[in-house]
Image (cartoon, rainbow, N blue to C red):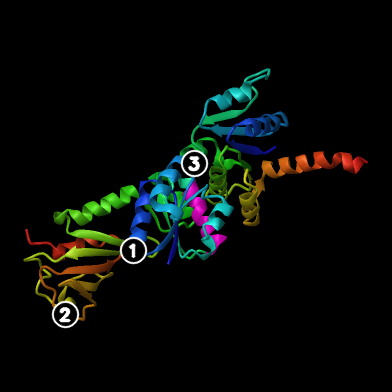
Amino acid sequence: MYAVVIGGGKVGLNLTRELLAKGTEVTLIESRRDRYLRMDAELGFVVQYGDGTELWVLERAGIQRADLVVAVTGDDEDNILICQIARDKYQVERFISRVNNPRNRQYFELLDIRPAFSATDLILRLIEHEVPDYGLVHLLDLPDEQLEVIEIVVCEGCRAAGLEVQQLELPEGSIVISVLRDEGGFVPKADTVINAGDEVLVCLDPGLEPQVTALFEAAK
Amino acid sequence: MSFVLIVGSGRVGSTVARNLLAAGHEVSVLDGDPISHERLDAGQDSTWEGAGGRFTIGQAIERDALVEAGIERADVFIASTNGDNTNLTIAQIAQKMFNVPRVMVRVMDPARAEWYSAQGLETICPTSYAVEMFERALEMPEAGA
């Protein structure tokens, strides 16, 4: 896989290091000379100097053969343009963009730049994942499709523990799509028994969350 | 008479704004820097507002600022800030979010100007004009010979 990362701030630099560690071929484009020189000392030819919104700079980095473009500059307009150009001019199939100001998210959506992530959202997700009491993690939101996927821990003594999937009183519009147990995951059958300590992935219509989570929370 | 919204009141934007106002159009200017308002007033007999112009201080990308400056009823939208990417983004916002009938955008980089023009934006590239002028000026003695 070949990835082109635009913007060598904290996000871009650390992402590049991670991708390199995983054996991915990466080029990082940085427009500030001082930052470029500092990163060049560490990463060498991986880093290229230039304005990553200029076509020739992107082409020099080999965007034509990129499998993934990551736009993580500190400027939302730059990120929008980069993704738009990558997608529409260079037919890059996968791209991901950073939203610096959450108020600009509407413009990413307007121009169909997806996925776009903001640090605010990510920190919220981390909190959900790290705080055990929270028991519920939003894995996926598909607002256009009116679907969400959530991960729920099956608590000791909850209504669902010990029941077969078909016996669960799940509201209309929700379904258990996966059970995570003993480091593995599987798609449950109707007669699969849900145990305390399992984690379940539930696909549901937005708004059903309270009804669904009530089944898996410990009785109060 | 058209209602023209100009975002970015530098040398180009402010001059276009004054000329359009003098030609009888309704003109609203949006810029984040109050100095650009002075640019509209400088050397004029009356103030910008006195002459009938509108001025809003605000960031080009802020929806509220665009609405306050009157984007919802603009016939013409001119993006002339000093940033190509800001111009290209707000031009698309004007086109796709507010359905402004005519959207014009200043792009200094000829390559991006050409590509976005092919995507349906009315781009104006001062760099290309400057190059053309220089080339024409340099060729003039030969042409006249």
Residue at image location 59% in from the left, 32% down from the top: B9
- Tell me where residue B84 appears, x and y as whole percent: 57, 43
Amino acid type at circle 2 is Thr
- Residue A130 in magenta stretch: no
Would you name the residue on which mark 2 appears? A192
Residue that numbered label 3 is attached to: B61
Amino acid type at mark 1? Lys
Chain where mark 2 sits: A
Chain identifier of the residue bearing label 1 in the image: A
Q: Where does the magenta region start and end?
A: A78-91
Q: Is mark 1 on a helix, strand or loop?
A: loop
Residue located 16% across and 80% down the image: A192
In screen coordinates, is B123 left or right of A140?
right
Residue at image coords 18%, 71%: A183
Question: Marks 1 and 2: which is nearer the front?
Answer: 1
- Residue B44 lies, with reference to residue B68, above or below; the image says above
Query: Quick one: label 3, few (<14), some, or many (20+) residues within 10 Å?
Result: many
